[in-house]
Image (cartoon, grey):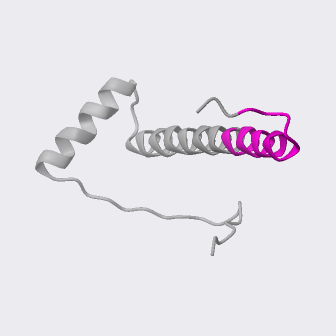
Amino acid sequence: MVEKVSLLRRVPIRIDFEEEEAEKFNTVKNYMGLKQNTEVIRALISEKYNEIQLIKQRRQAQLTKEAKAMEWLEKGEYKCPM
């Protein structure tokens, strides 16, 4: 079951990176050209969210194409190339 998230809900995060994780974090921070640590977290979340939305759109488009092909196949208007 998917829980709907209220836009007003806060998500406090307190993270301490050490050693290798800190190095990775700083590499990402520098690569993205960001100054604040919180900006890095927000940017990565936004980037991943956009990626998920794109995957969902592509999946929906594929399902729509498949449904249309099945409809044509059932009507006898579509010949499967296989």
Using the image as rendered, state which of residue 48 and residue 21 is in the foreground: 48
Q: Is residue 23 magenta?
A: no
Q: Is residue 63 magenta?
A: yes
The overriding secondary structure of the stretch rendered in magenta is: helix
Q: Position of residue 26 (x, y in %)?
A: 25, 36
Q: Give the residues drawn in magenta, as a range.
A: 62-79
Q: Residue at x 53, y 64 (%)?
A: 11
Q: Quadrant of the C terminus?
A: top right
**Residue 80 in the figure: left or right of residue 30:** right
Q: Residue at x 71, y 66 (%)?
A: 6
Report the residue that reaches farthest toward the left: 19
Q: Position of residue 66 (x, y in %)?
A: 71, 42
Q: Quadrant of the N terminus?
A: bottom right
Report the residue that reaches farthest toward the bottom: 1
Using the image as rendered, state which of residue 14 and residue 5 is in the foreground: 5
Q: Residue at x 40, y 29 (%)?
A: 34
Q: Position of residue 28 (x, y in %)?
A: 31, 33
Q: Residue at x 59, y 65 (%)?
A: 10
Residue 54: which quarter of the image?
A: top right
Looking at the rendered structure, the number of numbered marks drawn on it comes to: 0
Residue 65: which quarter of the image?
A: top right
Q: Position of residue 19 (x, y in %)?
A: 11, 48
Please say if 66 is above or below 4: above
**Residue 38 in the figure: left or right of residue 22:** right
Using the image as rendered, state which of residue 22 and residue 4 is in the foreground: 4
